[in-house]
Image (cartoon, coloured by chain):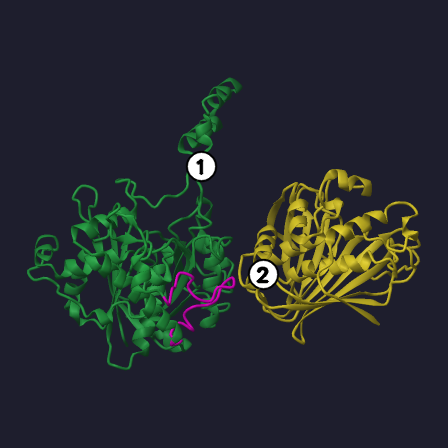
C-alpha cells in the first residue's frame, strides 16, 4: 500500500473547487478531477502532529450540544480527518466524485478519552467499492494515534446512487435496518434553518447541499439538509454524561433531515448498550438509527 | 425522627484554575465550568453512578435561562441522575453558604453526603436588554389588536437598543464595591503600603503553595490552564507601587494590584456524615462545626459595605466559647486588601468593638503568619461563587496536613449588599 505523508492539513477551498469540477460533464477525464478511475486507489494519506484547537473545539461543542471541557467528544476527530477524506476523494485517481455521495453509515471506536493538548497522527484510506441495493458503496477508514497508541477509529460509509448498483441483493446496508420501533422518545430538538451553515463553518464540510436550499435543489432536496455527522454528534451529546471511556458508536443514516426541522431523539437500553434513533417529530420519518456499545 | 445533631465532615474539594476575565475561559459558560468541576470531584472520590443526598451550588452572575444551573450541571456529570440539586445565591458568600446548607442537612440526618459548589464567569456574562425596551416588549406581547401593537412599536427609541451589561455596583448606593471599599480604607486610615504588602504576601504564599505541591490535588487543569492566571510569583513592592489608584480618586490607595480582578472559575467540596465517610473510605480532613452570617446597613447607617464579617465572627466565638486567638488558620477572603485590613483593625479597635459590636473588650490582634497561609483571592482571583469552595478545600487540607498540632480554622467572607458569611473548621 502506498502511504503519502502530508505536511499540513489540505486546503479545503481548493478541494471543494475540485469536487465541484467533477460535476461538470466530461471533467472527470481531467487528471486532477476525481471520477476517472474504476477502482479505489491503494493509497493511504497520513498527517502527523494534528493539534486540537481549543477555540474550534469550543465552537464544535456549542453547535453539537456538548458541555465545554478538557475532553474531546468522540465525534470530534472526524472533523480533523475530514480534509484527508476530501483529499482522498478529490484525488484524480479516485473513481467516485465526492459531491453527490450520500453518507449512509458511520462507526466510531473510541479507545480512550482524548484531551485538549494531545496531538494526533491520522491515517486515512478507502476500502474497495461494493455493490449496494441502491448503487455502489465504499468506506473511508480513519485511525488516530497518540504517539503509537491507537486511540480512535472510524469507518465512514458512502453511497453513490444508481450507476451499476442493484446487483448485490443482500447489500451490507439498506436492507435490514435496526429494529427501533420500540424506542421511546426522550427529547425533542428544534433544528434551525442555518444549522448546516453553523456546523459547516466549524467542521469545514461546506458541501452546498448543507448550506442553503439553492445548494440542495440540484441534488433533489427542497431545502438544505443537516450534516449526518452533526446528527450523530448531537446524539452522542445527549447520551454522553456517564458513558465509560471505551465504546463504539455506530449509526446508520436514513432519510436526510430537511432544515429547519423538529426531530425526536429516542433511546432504550439494548444488549448491555444503548439503541437510539432520530425521527422527524410530526411524521416519524426515520433520520438516524444507532447503537452505543 | 432522630433528634441528635451529628458532626459534618469535609472530605475534600477541587477547583479549576481561576482565569482572568476574557482569558482562557472566555467561551466557557457557568454550566460548562460547574459540570467540569463537579465531574473532577466525582473522579477524585470515585462517585461515578453514586446518588448523593444533594448538590448545592450557585453563581452570582447568572442568566435567567440557567434557573436550574446546578441540576443541569449534575445531569452532565457521572453522578447518578437521581441526585437532587438546587441553586443558591448570596453574592460572594454563595460558595460558603452552599456548604453550610449541605452541612446543616447532614447534621440533621436529612442527607448523608452532598456537594457544595460555586461558579462564576465574568466573560460569558448575561446581558439584559434595556429596561424600557423590556417593558415595551412585554406590552407588545399583551397587545390584542394591530393598532395597539403599532402604538407600542412607535414608542421604541434608538437608545433603548443598547443592552445592559451586569455592573459591579450596589443597587441602593450606585457605588461600585471598590468605591465602597475605598471609603472603608479612608475611614480606617489604611496606607497604600500595607495594602500592597498584603497583596504581595498573597502572591508569594500562593506561589509557594504551588511549588510545594499543596495544590496538586486541589486544582484540576481546565481548557489548557494549569495555574491561576492572575498569580504573579515574581511581583514586588516596587511593581505594585507603580500601579495607579483605581478607586477612591487620584490620591486613593486602592489599585488593580491590591484589589481582586474580575475572574472566571468554579470549585466544589464533598461533605458527609462520619458514617458515610467511614463506609466509603475517604479520610475526614476537617469538621465544619459552626457557621454564622451577618449583615450591615451600608445605606443609611454608613457602616462599611464589607464589614459584616466583623459582626458575624463575635457571635460565632461566643457560641463556641472561643477567643479570636484560638485559631491556627485564618482564611479572610481578600476581596480587596483594604477589606482584610479594615476587618483586622476593627477587631483590634476598642471603640468599634464596644460601640458597633457591643463587646466589652476588643477581639484583639491575630498572628499574621496564620492569615491566608496558602495565598488568597488577591493572588488566585475571585470568581464570586467559587471562592467559598476554594477556601474550604484549602483550609480542610491545611488542617489535615498539619503536623504541628493545629486544630482550628476560621473562614470569613464579605459579600455585596452588606453581607458576611463566616464558619469554623476543626481538625478531627
**In the visual, does A278 lie left or right of B219?**
right
Asked if the residues shown at circle 2 and circle 1 are in contact, with their CB atoms under 8 angstroms apart, the answer is no
In the rendered image, which residue does mark 1 sit on?
B163
Range of the magenta residues? B212-234
SS at mark 1? loop
- In the image, residue B52 above or below residue B279: above
The residue under the point 75% across, 45% down is: A208
Residue B145 at what x, y percent from top left? 51, 20
SS assignment for the magenta stretch, majority: loop
Q: Nearer the viewer, residue B314 or B365?
A: B365
Q: Colour of chain A?
A: yellow
Q: Colour of chain B?
A: green
Residue B167: quarter of image = top left
The residue under the point 15% across, 66% down is: B365
Using the image, name the chain to which the residue with label 1 belongs.
B
**In the visual, does A179 lie left or right of B20?**
right
Amino acid at each position: 500500500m502506498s502511504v503519502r505523508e502530508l505536511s499540513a492539513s489540505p486546503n479545503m477551498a481548493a478541494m471543494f473547487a475540485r469536487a465541484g469540477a467533477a460535476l461538470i460533464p466530461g471533467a472527470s477525464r481531467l487528471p486532477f478531477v476525481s471520477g476517472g478511475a474504476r477502482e479505489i486507489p491503494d493509497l493511504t494519506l497520513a498527517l502527523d502532529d494534528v493539534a486540537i484547537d481549543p477555540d474550534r473545539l469550543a465552537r464544535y461543542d456549542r453547535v453539537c450540544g456538548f458541555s465545554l471541557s478538557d475532553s474531546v467528544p468522540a465525534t470530534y476527530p472526524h472533523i480533523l480527518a475530514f480534509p484527508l477524506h476530501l483529499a482522498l476523494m478529490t484525488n484524480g485517481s479516485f473513481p467516485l466524485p465526492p459531491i453527490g455521495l450520500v453518507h449512509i453509515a458511520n462507526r466510531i471506536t473510541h479507545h480512550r478519552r482524548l484531551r485538549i493538548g494531545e496531538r494526533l497522527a491520522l491515517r486515512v484510506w478507502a476500502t474497495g467499492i461494493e455493490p449496494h441495493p441502491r448503487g455502489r458503496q465504499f468506506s473511508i477508514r480513519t485511525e488516530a494515534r497518540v504517539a503509537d497508541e491507537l486511540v480512535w477509529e472510524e469507518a465512514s460509509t458512502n453511497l453513490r446512487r444508481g450507476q451499476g448498483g442493484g446487483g448485490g441483493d443482500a447489500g451490507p446496508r439498506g436492507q435490514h435496518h435496526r429494529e427501533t420501533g420500540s424506542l421511546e422518545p426522550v427529547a425533542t430538538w428544534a433544528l434551525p434553518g442555518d444549522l448546516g451553515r453553523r456546523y459547516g463553518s466549524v467542521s469545514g464540510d461546506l458541501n452546498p447541499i448543507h448550506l442553503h436550499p439553492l445548494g440542495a435543489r440540484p441534488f433533489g432536496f427542497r431545502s438544505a439538509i443537516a450534516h449526518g455527522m452533526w446528527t450523530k454528534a448531537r446524539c452522542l451529546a445527549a447520551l454522553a454524561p456517564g458513558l465509560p471511556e471505551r465504546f463504539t458508536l455506530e449509526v446508520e443514516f436514513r432519510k436526510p433531515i430537511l432544515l429547519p426541522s423538529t426531530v425526536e431523539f429516542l433511546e432504550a437500553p439494548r444488549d448491555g448498550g444503548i439503541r437510539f434513533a432520530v425521527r422527524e417529530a410530526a411524521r416519524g420519518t426515520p433520520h438516524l438509527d444507532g447503537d452505543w456499545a | 425522627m432522630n433528634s441528635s445533631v451529628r458532626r459534618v465532615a469535609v472530605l475534600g474539594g477541587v477547583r479549576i484554575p481561576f482565569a482572568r476575565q476574557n482569558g482562557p475561559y472566555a467561551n466557557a459558560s457557568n454550566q460548562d465550568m460547574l459540570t467540569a468541576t463537579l465531574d473532577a470531584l466525582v473522579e477524585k472520590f470515585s462517585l461515578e453512578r453514586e446518588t448523593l443526598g444533594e448538590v448545592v451550588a450557585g453563581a452570582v452572575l447568572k442568566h435567567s435561562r440557567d434557573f436550574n444551573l446546578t441540576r443541569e450541571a449534575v445531569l452532565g456529570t457521572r453522578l447518578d441522575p437521581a441526585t437532587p440539586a438546587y441553586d443558591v445565591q448570596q453574592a460572594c458568600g454563595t460558595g460558603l453558604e452552599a456548604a453550610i446548607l449541605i452541612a446543616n442537612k447532614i447534621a440533621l440526618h436529612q442527607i448523608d453526603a452532598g456537594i457544595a459548589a460555586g461558579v462564576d464567569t465574568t466573560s460569558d456574562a448575561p446581558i439584559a436588554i434595556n429596561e424600557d425596551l423590556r417593558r415595551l416588549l412585554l406590552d407588545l406581547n399583551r397587545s390584542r389588536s394591530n393598532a395597539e401593537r403599532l402604538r407600542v412599536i412607535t414608542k421604541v427609541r434608538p437608545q433603548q437598543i443598547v443592552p445592559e451589561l451586569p455592573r459591579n455596583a450596589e443597587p441602593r448606593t450606585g457605588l461600585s464595591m471598590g468605591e465602597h471599599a475605598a471609603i472603608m480604607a479612608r475611614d480606617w486610615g489604611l496606607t497604600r503600603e500595607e495594602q500592597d504588602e498584603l497583596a504581595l504576601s498573597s502572591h508569594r504564599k500562593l506561589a509557594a503553595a504551588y511549588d510545594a505541591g499543596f495544590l496538586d490535588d486541589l486544582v484540576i487543569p481546565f481548557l489548557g490552564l494549569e495555574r491561576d492566571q492572575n498569580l504573579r510569583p515574581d511581583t514586588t513592592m516596587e511593581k505594585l507601587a507603580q500601579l495607579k489608584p483605581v478607586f477612591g480618586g487620584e490620591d486613593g490607595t486602592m489599585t488593580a494590584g491590591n484589589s481582586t480582578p474580575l475572574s472566571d472559575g468554579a470549585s466544589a467540596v464533598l461533605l458527609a456524615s462520619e458514617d458515610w465517610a467511614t463506609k466509603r473510605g475517604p479520610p475526614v480532613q476537617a469538621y465544619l462545626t459552626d457557621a454564622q452570617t451577618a449583615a450591615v446597613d451600608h445605606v443609611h447607617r454608613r457602616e462599611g459595605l464589607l464589614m459584616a464579617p466583623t459582626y458575624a465572627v463575635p457571635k460565632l466565638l461566643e457560641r463556641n466559647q472561643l477567643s479570636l486567638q484560638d485559631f491556627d488558620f485564618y482564611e479572610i477572603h481578600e476581596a480587596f486588601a483594604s477589606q482584610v485590613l479594615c476587618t483586622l483593625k476593627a477587631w483590634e479597635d476598642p471603640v468599634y468593638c464596644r460601640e458597633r459590636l457591643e463587646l466589652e473588650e476588643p477581639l484583639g490582634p491575630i498572628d499574621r503568619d496564620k492569615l491566608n497561609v496558602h495565598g488568597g483571592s488577591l493572588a488566585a482571583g475571585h470568581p464570586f461563587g467559587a471562592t467559598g469552595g476554594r477556601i474550604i478545600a484549602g483550609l480542610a487540607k491545611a488542617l489535615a496536613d498539619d503536623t504541628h498540632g493545629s486544630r482550628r480554622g476560621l473562614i470569613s467572607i464579605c459579600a455585596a449588599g452588606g453581607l458576611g458569611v463566616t464558619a469554623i473548621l476543626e481538625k478531627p
